[in-house]
Amino acid sequence: MAKTMAEKILSAKARKDVRAGEIVEAEVDYVMVNDITAPAAFDEFEGFCTPPLEKKMVLIPDHYVPNKDVASAIQAKKMRDFASKYKIRNYFEIGSGGVCHQLMIEKGFVAPGRLIVGADSHTCSYGAMGAFATGIGSTEAATVFARGVLWFKVPESMKFEVNGQLGRHVSGKDIILTIIGDIGVEGALYQSMEVVGDTISALPVSERVTISNMGIEAGAKACIIPPDAKVDDYLKGRVRDTYEKVYADKDAEYSDIRKYDAKDIVPVVAKPFLPSNVAPASEVGVTIDQAYLGSCTNGRIEDLRVAAAILKGKKVHEGVRMIVVPASKDVFDKAMEEGLFKIFSDAGAFISGPTCGACLGGYMGVLAPGERCVSTTNRNFIGRMGHMESEVYLAGPAVVAASAVAGRIVDPSEVTG
């Protein structure tokens, strides 16, 4: 019987033929935890009375980096102490790391055909490389620390086909927001999304990561994009160990198939308070107080280049605060070398080192009552970036940069001409 990508990967890792709906125990390639989710996982693990499978473990402090208070400093120290106690090699300290999902991809942990779990919901980002990746809880992470395996219910799969040439200023962020706007935040609940088509094949790896990253915002268990030569090129010199690409069979069964014409996709914005509350950027027009460029969704060098091209020679609108946060040290260094920071600084933007701080309203860029932020992040729930009476509008880098200049949410063409 034909299989989807999810069924094939889980079959390989369970070492038996599996189908959607079955519950299986499967071998995990890597488990990732960050400074928020790790401490609870460490506490649970200590009850196993066994050395951890450290080769499978990746520890990345990123949410409260640098530490914002004593409580976050204690969390970070617990992570540091655990890494030292068990000699965890894959520990990325502040100054050498970055946002966890960007690091996992950059450092070669992610590759086609792998099964990766992480104690963070946006672990699904790794599906952009042809992996089955999903978020788990801290207790489950502790189980993987000790045993290297975890149980999974094999999900049904949905297929999303996007074909044709994208218009000007349209990116992967607009594709995934359009899909979420179509199916809703529970439209792919506990299913694996397969995103395919010649439009997707034409996208760089960075924009595919954006698409997979937000699969969870539709309720998906995983969001997988078939790997190709671009993935192979990206992995050269960085991937750990070997990998084998996996593809769905032509006659695989899907619970739903949705088709989109690229020419119909425009720069869009997800208005408060759901990622599915999508509208064309040209129709939003609300004034903003803050513009945020960064996060595991859109903090890659390609995203910074898009924003810098729009901001070059322009100024951030009076009354608007713009914050730029590269997703990793590597992205930071490249942006500096390419002169992007000079463009951002000249425009009046604030630049930070890699951190998740603003995305979750942790300690920077926090919004006051009544304030609005247009952001390249992935969630716009009530109170996501600050006060319960603040508002977050989700968009791609081009919309965020153009809106920062205009002082209100606009289609990028209004600023670029």
Image (tube, helix red, strand yellow):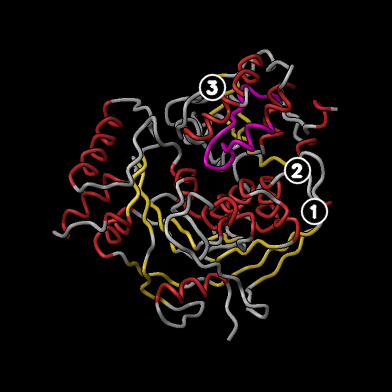
Please say if 298 is above or below 214. Answer: above
**Amino acid type, mark 2:** Val
Circles 2 and 1 in contact, beta carbons < 8 Å:
yes
Location of the C terminus by quadrant is: top right
| Label 3 neighbour load within 10 Å: few <14, some 14-19, many 20+ | some
Give, as a single range, the part of the protein colored magenta.
287-306
Q: Which residue is mark 2?
A: 170
**Amino acid type, mark 1:** Ala
Q: Residue 359 — which label?
A: none
Q: Which residue is mark 1?
A: 262
Where residue 231 sits in the image (x, y, percent)?
59, 55
**Distance (Cα) linking label 3 and label 2:** 25 Å
**Amino acid type, mark 3:** Ile
SS type, badge 1: helix
Which residue is painted at 71% across and 23% down in the image?
A: 311
Q: Nearer the viewer, residue 251 or 193?
A: 251
**Distance (Cα) linking label 1 and label 3:** 33 Å
In this rendering, position of residue 4 left or right of residue 50:
right
In this rendering, position of residue 273 left or right of residue 417:
left
Q: Residue furthest right?
A: 417
Q: Nearer the viewer, residue 172 or 318?
A: 172
Q: Which residue is mark 3?
A: 351
